[in-house]
Image (cartoon, rainbow, N blue to C red):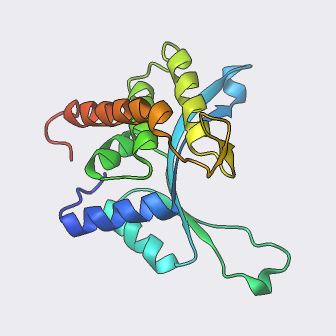
Amino acid sequence: MVNKLNSERDIGWLSGIIDGEGHLGLYRNRQKRYGNGFAWSVRIGIANTNLDALRFIKSMLGVGFINRKSMPARSSKYKQGYAYIIDSASSVLRILPQLSLRIKASQSALLLEAASIIVAGRNNIGTRRLDEIHDAMRKLNQRGPTRDSRGRFAPAGARTESKNQPERESALRRREEAKSSLPLGLP
């Protein structure tokens, strides 16, 4: 059961951690039981070398698990890394609306939509929309230099007013709609 975030301080802190260290993703998982098909899954992940911080987040939210990340061969140069992961669509639907993400607001809105399709059991019906969401999230999560609307190199995730502003506004609208569509009694 997902715990409700009680204070503005907790909400702000966790939002900042996810914006800075986190990852929001939608994945296609090939599974033999579906023949040639696959299953969709959503994920909120936070990578960090501070295990205590990740344990605190896990206790704050009451869901998820922590994995130890594999180390490179030259591990004496690096600190051990860990990843806190939430991979339950119903947990994602309860956590994301409580947060106030700024950098990952578009990904958050898309992930909420995908999680609601998955929880409703409309994987087969919603496959086309899930494909669209997956493609959009891959673009938003892209690393490295990209080109802006004029063909100039821009940092990954950089937004140009002319091209991405309407997309961001519609993502924020979808996020607010998802918040308002949660049943009463859920955080």
The answer to whether residue 57 is visible is: yes
Q: Hey, which quadrant is residue 10 in on the image?
A: bottom left
Report x, y in % for residue 182: 22, 34
Give whichever of 58, 140 is nearer the camera.
140
Residue 16 against residue 93 in the figure, above or below: below
For image coordinates 44% across by 76% down, the residue present is: 53
Residue 93 against residue 104 in the figure, above or below: above
Report x, y in % for residue 172: 33, 37
Query: In the figure, is residue 94 to the left or right of 31?
Result: left
Query: In the figure, is residue 22 to the left or right of 11?
Result: right
Report x, y in % for residue 50: 52, 79
Residue 103 against residue 173 in the figure, above or below: below
Give whichever of 168, 78 is nearer the camera.
168
* Residue most extreme to the top: 125
The answer to whether residue 115 is visible is: no
For image coordinates 73% across by 68% down, the residue present is: 70
Give whichever of 73, 66 is nearer the camera.
73
